[in-house]
Amino acid sequence: MSRLPGLYQWNDIVGKRFPHLSKPMAACLALWSLGMIVARSCSLTAVAWAWVPILKEKFYTLRERLRDLYREAPAKAGAKRTELDLGTCWAPWLSWVVEGWHSKQLALALDATTLGQRFTVLAVSVLYRGCAVPVAWKIMRGNEPHAWAPEWKAMLNHFRQRVPADWNVIVLADRGLYAKWLFKAITALHWHPLLRVKNQGKFRPEGWYHWIDMPDVVAHVGQRWQGRGTAFKSESAQLKCTLLACWEEGYADPWLILTDLPPEAGDVCWYGLRAWIEQGFKRIKRGGWQWQYTRMDDPARAERLWLAVAIATWWLLSVGGEADEELPVETMDQVPHTQRSRRPRWRLIAIFHRGWTQILAALLHHGRLPLGEGWPEPWPQMIPPPAENPANEPSKPKNLQL
C-alpha cells in the first residue's frame, strides 16, 4: 500500500472510534469513507478507481477489499471473516457525533426516504447547520410491506444514556409518522418530542370540559396558541401533552405540534428545523454521494454501506461547520424580507462543500487531515410582529426564522 499519510491518520481515527471492530473492518471503513470524498461518490466502482492511482494497486484488488465492508461473512474469502454488525455501531457512532458538541441543545429528526421502488429508508438524524447526518437507520425493500414501529423503537433504544442528562434534546417528526407509542418512546429517553399531527382530531385544554377541533385554536393566518391539555378524544389515543399551534402567512395549513414540554418552555418554530433532514437526504443522493445511481439491491448490504456514507457526511459537515463558525458576521450578507433584529446570514457555500474543499486541500498538500467538532447554531425563536415597518423594510416581514 502506498504510504499516504492522510489515509493512515484516518484509519487510526476510525479504529479508535469503533474499537470493537476488527482491524481489517475498521481499515475498510476508513478506505470507503475517505475514498468517497476523493471520488465524490459512494459507488463501488468510482471509489475503487479513485484509489487506483493513489495507492498504486490493481482495480480488482481494491474493489474486492471495499466489498468486504458490506458482504456477509459466508461471501468473504477466509475462514475467520465476519460481517459488519451495525447494532454494535449505533451507540459509538452517536457518541462520535456529539463528542465536542459546543452546546447543550441537540435536535434530532425522524423521517423516511425512498430509492425508487427498490428501498425504503427509516432514518434518525442529527440536525446541524441546515443539514443532517444519520445516526441510525433501517433499510427495507420498497415493494414489500414491513412494520415500521418495531424498527423506530429499536433504533431509539440504542441511544439510552448516550447523551448527557442535562442536555435539551428535541425529536422532530412529520405528521405522517405521528403515533402515541412514538411520543412515549421518545419521552422514555428523557428527550422531548415535537411531533406534528394532521389537521383533524380533538383537543381539550387543561381545565376545560368540552373538546374543540384542534385546528380551531388557530383558525386564522397570523394566530398562535400554546397550552396544556389532552389530545384526541378516543380513549386509546388520548395523550396528555402540550399543543403548540401556529399559522403563518404563506402556509396552506397551520402547524399543530404535540410535545411534553411546558407551554412556556417550547417554541413552535423549532419544528422548522425538521426540514434540514431533507437536505441530509439530498447530500446522500444527488447533492453529494450520488446514492440514487446504486445498483445494489440487497437492503442489508445497503445498510452496512450507509455507515461509511454517514461517517463521510459528518466529517464534511463538522469540518465545514467549524470553518463557517469562524467567519466574521460582518462579512456575510443578510437575508432579505426578514426582520432586522433576527436576520440570519446567507451562506456563500454550503458547509458540506466547504468541508470537502478543506479535506481535499490537506490531501493535496500531504498534511494532516482537518477534524471538526459540532458548532450548532442557536435554535430559532418566534418573534412578535413589529408595531410599524420602517420605510426601508418590506411591508410584510416573515416572523418564522430558521
Image: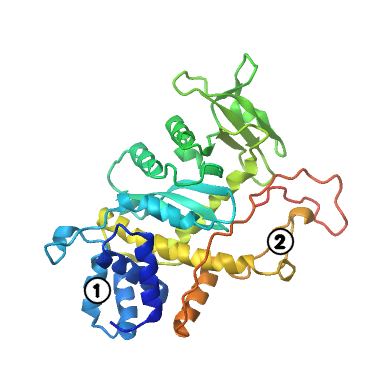
Q: At which x and y percent is residue 125?
A: 46, 51
- SS class, disc 1: helix
Residue occupying the point 46% across, 66% down? 315
Q: Amino acid at mark 1?
A: Arg
Q: Is residue 214 above or below residue 395?
A: above
Q: Is residue 145 above or below residue 69?
A: above
Question: Which circle marks residue 339 in the picture?
Answer: none
Query: Does residue 298 show up?
Result: yes
Residue under numbered circle 2: 335
Query: Does residue 42 show up?
Result: no
How packed mark 1 is, by other alpha carbons closer than 10 Å (few <14, some 14-19, many 20 or more), is: some
Q: Quadrant of residue 285?
A: bottom left
Residue occupying the point 52% across, 20% down? 233
Task: Tell me which label, 1 or 2, sits earlier in the chain.
Answer: 1
Q: Quadrant of the N terminus?
A: bottom left
- SS class, disc 2: loop
Question: Which circle marks residue 63 in the picture?
Answer: 1
Q: At which x and y percent is residue 387?
A: 85, 44
Q: Is residue 328 left or right of residue 114?
A: right
Foreground pick, 61 / 167: 167
Q: Amino acid at mark 2?
A: Val
Q: Is residue 58 above or below residue 389?
A: below
Foreground pick, 190 / 180: 190
Q: Is residue 363 left or right of residue 351?
A: left
Q: Which numbered disc, 1 or 2, marks the residue closer to the eye?
A: 1
